[in-house]
């Protein structure tokens, strides 16, 4: 019956190993995934977090998940069914689930919801995200050093603040070490589509890019770079170490497990409250995969120093002076971008000075 209500989605049920005698003593936690679990990338890492919840709580928690849920009406159907099936807590793991999450949460006030990368809260809806732009700064630093063509390709998913922040952060740090660098950006309008991602990578390589960054989830760009030869790439969300030491020379790794365990514990304790969480390298929500020996030793050392500076709270990737794309001032010398408010990072919808092209509207 459940599956019949979830057109377009792949249903899977993951249950803790213990038997649930009465069905009321366990805490039921649902996860809604935008892509297939697969073997790497965004959804894979969320599922790693789900498995960590199961391992941590054992028979006290039952988890369920649905993968490949489109960001539209199907998402509301999936969330509604999870709530009707007794979920106490539901994690919805893609930006496009924001309004569906709010809509379903209003109908189930006793169910707690956690939406990844959004900004709309309610009494029973928390939001959480990671400061991926910190990892993009490291990637940009390496990319700026390693490009010989001075053309860096960027496969973007959707024109939302999270993605725009990543582009700006990578560009600023590439430009800092290589004033001649140019970014070419392809908008794929997908989070996970290996064929589209491979096509985007190929287009960028044909346009001269010898470094390709991605904000999409599959390893298709890595494979395209490997086939092309001397093209540098970075792992996205997962380490993607199978493509190391080259073309993948480092990676951004998402680590959701501690957060999922803590929020599940809060529901079990009755202490859950609606919160907004945005953590980065310092708390460990963002990890940096090994910088391989394909990166020159001095570049590797400076990149690792940047990571440690962010870990220590001594460096913020958006520190002025920084202008907007039209040349108007955004951040003055030494000024650090605010998270929220006018021109804050949370709502970033503009390119910084030097990036060519328009943010799609």
Image (cartoon, rainbow, N blue to C red):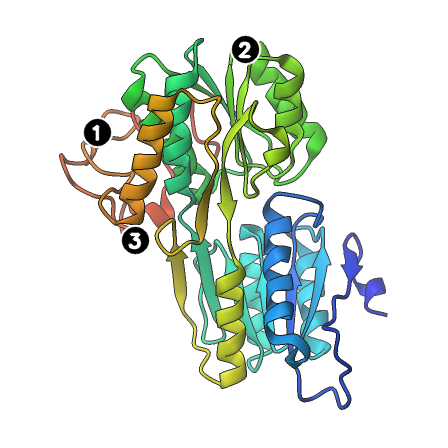
Number of the label disc, if any, that sits on residue 328: 1
Tag 3's secondary structure?
A: loop
How far apart in space, not on screen, are marks 3 and 1 (Cα)?
Answer: 19 Å
> In the visual, does 167 lie left or right of 318?
right
> In the visual, does 214 lie left or right of 183?
right
Above or below 193: residue 100 = below
Please report whichever mark, 1 or 2, sits nearer to the chain's N-terminal start.
2
Please report whichever mark, 2 or 3, sits nearer to the chain's N-terminal start.
2
Nearer to us: label 1 or label 2: 2
Q: Looking at the picture, how far across and down is residue 103, in whole percent?
A: 57, 67
How many other residues sit within 10 Å of disc 3, few (<14), some (14-19) or many (≥20)? few
The residue indicated by pointer 2 is 207
Tag 1's secondary structure?
A: loop
> In the visual, does 108 lie left or right of 297?
right
Q: Looking at the picture, how far across and down is residue 293, in whole percent?
A: 47, 24
Number of the label disc, if any, that sits on residue 340: 3
Please report whichever mark, 3 or 1, sits nearer to the chain's N-terminal start.
1
Above or below 176: residue 41 = below
Please report the residue visible at 65 percent of the width from the left and 62 percent of the height from the top.
51
Please report the residue visible at 46 percent of the width from the left and 39 percent of the height from the top.
163
Location of residue 52 by image quarter: bottom right
Q: Looking at the picture, how far across and down is residue 212, in whole percent?
A: 52, 23
Q: Nearer the viewer, residue 325 or 251?
A: 251
């Amino acid at each position: 019956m459940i599956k019949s209500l979830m057109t377009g989605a792949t249903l899977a049920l993951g249950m803790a190993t213990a038997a649930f005698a009465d069905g009321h003593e366990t805490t039921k936690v649902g996860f809604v995934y935008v892509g297939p679990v697969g073997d790497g990338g965004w959804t894979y890492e969320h599922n790693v977090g789900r498995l960590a919840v199961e391992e941590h709580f054992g028979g006290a928690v039952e988890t369920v998940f649905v993968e490949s849920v489109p960001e539209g009406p199907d998402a509301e159907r999936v969330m509604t069914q999870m709530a009707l099936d007794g979920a106490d807590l539901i994690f919805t793991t893609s930006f496009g689930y924001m309004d569906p999450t709010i809509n379903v949460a209003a109908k189930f006030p006793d169910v707690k919801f956690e939406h990844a990368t959004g900004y709309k809260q309610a009494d029973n809806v928390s939001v959480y995200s990671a400061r991926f732009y910190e990892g993009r700064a490291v990637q940009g630093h390496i990319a700026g050093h390693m490009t010989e063509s001075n053309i860096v390709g960027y496969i973007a998913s959707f024109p939302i603040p999270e993605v725009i922040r990543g582009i700006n952060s990578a560009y600023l740090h590439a430009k800092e070490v290589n004033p001649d660098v140019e970014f070419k950006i392809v908008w794929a309008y997908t989070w996970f589509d290996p064929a589209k991602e491979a096509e985007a990578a190929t287009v960028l390589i044909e346009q001269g890019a010898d470094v390709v960054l991605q904000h999409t989830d599959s390893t298709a760009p890595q494979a395209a770079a490997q086939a092309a030869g001397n093209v540098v790439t970075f792992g996205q969300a997962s380490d993607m170490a199978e493509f190391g030491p080259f073309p993948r020379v480092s990676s951004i790794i998402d680590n959701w497990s501690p957060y999922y365990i803590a929020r599940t514990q809060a529901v079990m304790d009755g202490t859950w409250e609606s919160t907004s969480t945005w953590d980065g390298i310092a708390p460990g929500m963002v990890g940096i995969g090994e910088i391989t020996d394909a990166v020159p030793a001095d570049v590797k050392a400076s990149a690792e120093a940047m990571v440690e500076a962010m870990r220590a709270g001594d460096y913020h990737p958006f520190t002025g002076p920084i202008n907007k794309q039209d040349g108007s001032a955004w951040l003055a010398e030494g000024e650090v971008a605010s998270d929220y408010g006018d021109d804050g990072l949370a709502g970033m919808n503009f390119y910084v000075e030097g990036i060519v092209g328009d943010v799609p509207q």
